[in-house]
Amino acid sequence: MDQSGALDTLLQEDRVFRPLPGLVMEANVNPQELAAAYRQAAQDPLGFWESAALELEWFRRWDKVLDESAPPHFSWFPGARCNIAHNALDRHTKTGNKHRLALIWEGEPGDIRKFTYFELYRAVNKLAGALRSLGVAKGDRVVVYMPPLPETVISMLACAKIGAVHCVVFPGFTGKALKERLRDARAKCLITADGFYRNGRVVPLKASLDEVLAGDDLDAVDICVVVRRANLDVEMHAARDVWYDDIVRHEKPEAPTEVMSANDPLFLLYTSGAAGKPKGVVHSHGGYMVGVHHTLNWVFDIKPTDIFWCTADPGWITGHSYAVYAPLLAGTTTLLYEGHPLYPQADRMWHITAKHGVSALYTTPTTIRMLMRYGNQFPRQHDLTSLRMLGSVGEPINPEAWVWFYQTIGRGECPVMDTWWQTETGQIMIAPMPVSLIKPGSVNKPLPGIEADIVDRSGAPVPPGKGGLLVIRRPWPGMMHSVWNDEEAYLACWNRIPGCYLAGDVARRDEDGYFWMQGRADEVINIAGHRLGTAELESALVSHRAVAEAAVIGVPDKIKGELAKAFVILREGFEESDELARELREHMRRELGPVAELKGVKFRADLPKTKSGKIMRRLLKAEELGTEPGDVSMLDDE
Ligand code: WTA
């Protein structure tokens, strides 16, 4: 039978996939244990998470597991002392993990660098010492503006080690978007690279940072550390800029690890929410490490021999949690790739998988759909038998893409774990386990210890089959600690539905209790799994001299899930034209970076608004898609 015929049969005959017996027999958590975990976690959720915490090392144990005395602020493991870098690195150098590979990195041109735990530990210690010598101290913010390089991982861990708070900014952000994040974080130190390789080109990075720093209002930045990656000629400002190689050269390979409180901040990471400006989601050392460590081990069934490849850029939460922290906490090997999945041709991911023997591959539906378009000839050229587990995250996966991934890449043997979670949740929340029955397109059920529900606007649970708002009813260890400098944004997640964390997603549950995600309920657009706020896009558009008003909506796209489409009212004296539309798209790239790509620009004489003057994007979307306005989104703010 040809492949498309096989796909059709799979999709029609049986929408439930059973794990193969071998996988069940070898699973870290077998079906009986999973059932027991669900029971235990329901009866005693704190006891459940306490057991997970006991799998890691603490300098001092907690006074209690969870302090719930000041909701919606929750404090996990209060009184405990720890450091995530101790658990991700230091402790492995005292076990059999010492000389195991911690990191395999492949550059786009094909260069490879490998680090054992011991080597990574030494590299991190050197940078930690260097940062300390430069005056970076506990609590200082360090912005890491880098492509996926070993130094990105080293920088994150070195910050953690000395108690500095890292803030990784995705290199796809430039201009205003970068500036806004730098200003809000008030970083003392920046770590960047001269440039990097992407899709066969060299992308300058230090230069786009210089442009932003040239402004008058970012005087907080004292130090800029530059990694030499692409041998670009960069301008070094004598009082501020230092080469990475120069500062680590004479540092000792040992540096003390700062003893942190469990609730001291580890990082802030900007993401888009309902509010206008991006919010700096804060995660702390203790709860976060418990959450990501536990979920990686459970959902991806991590074994000592695994090579785990999470394709997310470290600039997003997926990269933080499952490309950097969780695999290192677990003592496994993480793989990082610098470049584009289609470079030099559409088999790069299969080439990397085969070459390094990747056993678990965690990627996005957009990547899967993109590669699927090239058919099966590319995967067929490579030996993908090292793969054991597959995963998907960031956006809803359509069953066709799920089945293709499962069949063509996973040989019909590797389950695809569709995992739902967010920057705010820090850790995977709703996902199958290796022993689960899987329905392609569904994110399965909340993991043990996670109490998720689907409710209406008043907070009442909705019956199976009906769409509603996804909420989490109980705190979980990986949850965000706060929002940087923005208490209101933090409270906004908790106060709409009393007592619950409101995720901002629409979902429904079927008769079997499986969750089906249906997209965002708020003004967030998810382009290829990259989360962008309409407000940030609109304000960049309005900064163009021709634009009086603008509204941006997400419209469906076959590959990227969603794309941003702009509706623009021009200022007096400007004429609509294809030329101007092109200029606006170019303007967006300059203002926010390549991540802010517009699918199209439509000129209009007016925009639909509420009485209070808010743009009704819901109506624009309905118009655009030719649907009933009521059907489009049940939650857009009236
Ligand atoms: C969406 C990424 C459907 C969702 C980890 C969420 C998903 C937002 C899934 C968070 C999934 C994430 N199925 N939708 N498996 N995973 N999403 O903060 O809308 O970048 O709210 O975190 O991505 O995006 P974020």
Image (cartoon, rainbow, N blue to C red):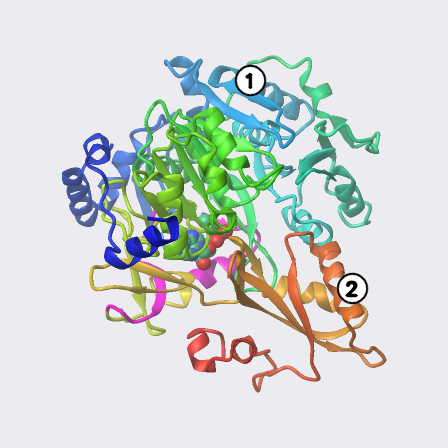
Please determine whether, in this image, residue 66 is positioned above or below residue 30: below
Q: Position of residue 277 (x, y in %)?
A: 61, 60
Q: Residues within 10 Å of mark 2 (few under 14, many from 20)?
A: few
Q: Which residue extends farthest bottom? A: 611
- Taking 143 as reference, is 303 left or right? left
Magenta-span inclusion, residue 465? yes
- Total labels: the figure holds 2
Magenta highlight range: 464-493
* Front residue of 510 and 94: 510
**Residue type indicated by callout 2:** Glu
Q: Looking at the rendered structure, which numbered label has been put on residue 582?
A: none
Q: Is residue 199 visible?
A: yes
Query: Is 371 in front, or is 456?
Result: 371
Mark 1 nearby-residue class (10 Å; few <14, some 14–19, many ≥20): many
SS assignment at label 2: helix
Residue labelled with disc 2? 583
Q: Quadrant of ligand 1?
A: bottom left
Q: Is residue 219 above or below residue 97?
A: below
The reply, left or right, for residue 614 in relation to residue 295 is right
Residue 478 in view in this figure: no
Which residue type does callout 1 highlight?
A: Ala
Q: Residue at x 30, y 29 (%)?
A: 55
| In-front residue for pair 222/454 | 454
Q: Secondary structure at mark 1?
A: loop
Instruction: Report whether the residue tagged 1 is closer than 8 Å to ligand 1.
Output: no
Asked if labels 1 and 2 touch by Cβ distance under 8 angstroms, the answer is no
Q: Which mark is residue 255?
A: 1
Residue visible at 32% across and 44% down in the picture: 66
> From mark 2 to mark 1, how far is it between C-alphas?
51 Å
